[in-house]
Image (cartoon, grey):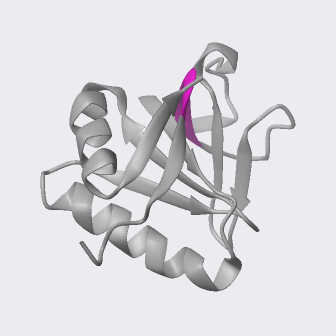
Amino acid sequence: MADRINAQVTLSPLVFAILKTKQPIQSAFANIIDLDNVTVIIEQSKYAANGDVTGAILDWKLFTLGPASLPEAGKIIAKVTSAMAAFGVAAVPIAAFDREHFLIKKSNLAAAITRFETLGLKVIKL
C-alpha cells in the first residue's frame, strides 16, 4: 500500500486538556501564542480552573510520531488527519521540529489505534 507510513507512534499514558488562556502556562506540554489567543495543551491532572482560563476541552490522548524530517511533516499530518476524518475521528495535529503529535479524544482511542495501524504505524503504549 503506497499510503503506508511504516513507522511507529507512541501513545502517552497521560490525559491532556486543551485550554484557552490569557497567558502561557510554564508547566504545559505546549503553549501556542498567536495574535488573538493563547492555547495551552497541558496534562489534565495539572489543569486547575482559574480566572486565566477562558475555555477548556478535556479528555485528549497524545500520540507522537517521529523523528521525521520537517519537509515530510506536512505529508504525514495530511495522511493521518485524512485517515482519521474518514472514520469520524478528529485528530488535532501539532508539528514540532522533528516529531508530529496528534491529540485524539479519549472516547475515540480504539478507533484511532485501528486507523494508525491501518496506515502502517505500530502503536507503542508507554
Give the residue drawn at x 52%, y 48%. 8
Give the residue drawn at x 63%, y 13%. 45
Camera-side residue of 71 and 23? 71
Q: Is residue 51 left or right of residue 73?
A: right
Give the residue drawn at x 69%, y 76%. 69
Which residues are the magenta region? Answer: 11-19
Camera-side residue of 109 and 122? 122
Tell which residue pokes out farthest to the left in this image: 87
Where 126 falls versus 121 (above or below)? above
Give the residue drawn at x 64%, y 57%. 66
> Quadrant of the rendered structure where residue 60 is?
top left
Where 116 falls versus 36 (above or below)? above
Q: Position of residue 77 (x, y in %)?
A: 45, 69
Tell which residue pokes out farthest to the bottom in this image: 71
Q: Position of residue 64 (x, y in %)?
A: 58, 46
Which is the main secondary structure of the residues drawn in magenta? strand
Q: Position of residue 20 (x, y in %)?
A: 58, 45
Where 112 falls versus 90 (above or below)? above
Q: Position of residue 59 (x, y in %)?
A: 42, 25
Camera-side residue of 33 and 6? 6
